[in-house]
Image: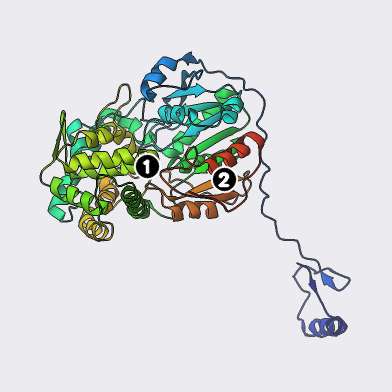
Amino acid sequence: MPRTINRAGAALLPLLLLVAAGCSVGPSQRPAVAYHDSEQQVAPAPQPPKPRPVPPLGAAPNDALNWQDCTDQTRAELGGLPPGLTFSCSRLLSTLDAPEAPERGTARNALIRTGSGRVPLVVVGDVGGEPGTTFAARMATQLPPEIRNTFDIIGMDRRGTGESEPADCVQPQQREEVLGFDPRATQRPDLDRLLESVLTASQECLLKLDERLQAYDTWRTASDLEELRLELGVPRLHAIGRGEAGRLLTTYAERYPGGVGRFVIDGAPDPTRDSMGQAEYQAQTAEQTFDVFAADCVSRNCPLGPNPRQTVSDLVERTRNTPLPAPGTSVPAGRVTQAVLQGLSDRNGWPALAEALAAGNRGDGARLAELTAPLVAAQGVNPPWFDGDLITSCNDTTLRVPPQRSSEIAQDWVNRFPLFGGVAAQRVVWCGSWPVPQQPLPTPRRADLPPIPVITTAHDPRTLALGTDHLADELPTGVPMRWQGAGHGAITRSTCVTDAISRFLVQGVVPTEGMACPE
């Protein structure tokens, strides 16, 4: 800002200049300072860019993709469809861009589309969950009619998942060993057995995938989204990202800010914490969500008794040494814990989760095996979820935890998070033998983006509310919202949130910053 010189200073200035001139040994080499009306002229500080307004929906796309009807396959996968809802499928070709072959190779991503609108709306979910096409199709059946009538809802299987050239490189035995591993193991010799299984899995994937191995990551998936935008022929991409996919949308925004349309982030990892911090957060939020599940269970007089936490804890303890029998498989303690994590994600499925755990308590592991089956075994055309989750997670982080720290972390987290600390600590050491990525994910910093609603769920078993709040704070144009409910993601689960997001996507009405929706 201009600095004003007072009158006394102005009167003394000529005298000071004369004195200085008399003492000088030669002409000054400094540039002259211009004065005007007793004020020094100072260049104004550069102003940060202003957020862009909400982008228009845009004209009908000039779609270059070859779509084919796949309604029957989708109906079979989802177990039914609302009347009149049809689906079509296609495949996106983009550049693989492996570290060993930059800007070369081809990646092939499976796509699905539904809706009667002409404006594309891309829906993406967690890389460790159901394939993106299935996730988008399922969400489309639950979205309000005004969204389906305005948009073509598009889902994409992310690299190495679903039908997008799935990784499918881990031997079944290793999947079973890693996901079924004792969640309460804390001693180094025991944890070394887990590390051996993970190392074997990593080596199998390296041999099978070769240069493609390090090309399955969020950085390059962002370029797949940009290629999708170009193939759809639209100036901007409108998108919803749930959970870990929120990081995919922020990565896209940093790399391709001009392509950002109406983005919505429904829960997301904390951008201020590394992968160890993320895993610790997940253990913490899973414990908190389980307490909400337990209270709900007791209120419904569910079959887990008056103390569901103790019942489930005892079940985990028993299955550490004696897995539950199930058709074609068995359910050790690790898979019991994984089943609880899967079940906590959907509030509507909590009664079924309680029944599955009660059956396990009676010695029948069939229902718990069903909950975890997609993690370890192919389901129809879809490969096991574990492989793509392992590869992308390890490619997305530069942190490598040495084996000697595994026992220390496990002891700490099992003590603090009795049900879920062990599996979270095990995830941290999964990547110990993995190549360190050359390209870390960017921190969301751009201030020239449009408003982006960021929705926090109070009790989300996968993303701690505080972590999503941190993303809303870090994202300069983030608009924080909060749902007081439980489950993974608020859109389609909270009427209040869904209505606000519908107004944003369809009409361009930005939600009130900090708005809170009741459970």
At 48% from the left edge and 36% from the top edge, which residue is drawn? 222
The residue that appears at 43% across and 48% down in the rendered structure is 269
Q: Is residue 12 left or right of residue 364?
A: right
Q: Amino acid at mark 2?
A: Pro
Figure quadrant of the N terminus: bottom right
Q: CA distance from mark 1 to mark 2?
A: 21 Å
Q: Position of residue 183 (x, y in %)?
A: 21, 49
Q: Position of residue 225 (x, y in %)?
A: 51, 32
- The image quadrant that residue 341 belongs to is top left
Side of 297 where 442 appears, left or right: right
Disc 2 crowd rating (10 Å Cα; few below 14, some 14-19, many 20+) is: many
Mark closer to the chain start, 1 or 2: 1
Check disc 1 and report its element: helix, strand or loop: loop
Q: Is residue 21 above or below residue 203?
A: below
Q: Residue at x 70, y 57 (%)?
A: 46
Q: Which mark is residue 345?
A: 1
**Which amino acid is tagged 1?**
Ser
Identify the residue shown where x is 36% and y is 27%. Answer: 162
In the image, which is nearer the foreground, mark 1 or mark 2?
1
Q: Is residue 137 above or below residue 364?
A: above
The kind of secondary structure element at disc 2 is strand
Q: Which residue is situated farthest in the front direction here?
A: 301
Looking at the image, can residue 393 be seen?
A: yes
Whether residue 199 is visible to the viewer of this picture, yes or no, is: no
Q: Which mark is residue 453?
A: 2
Q: Residues within 10 Å of mark 1 (few under 14, many from 20)?
A: many
- Disc number placed over residue 264 in the picture, else none: none
255 sits left or right of 460 in the view:
right
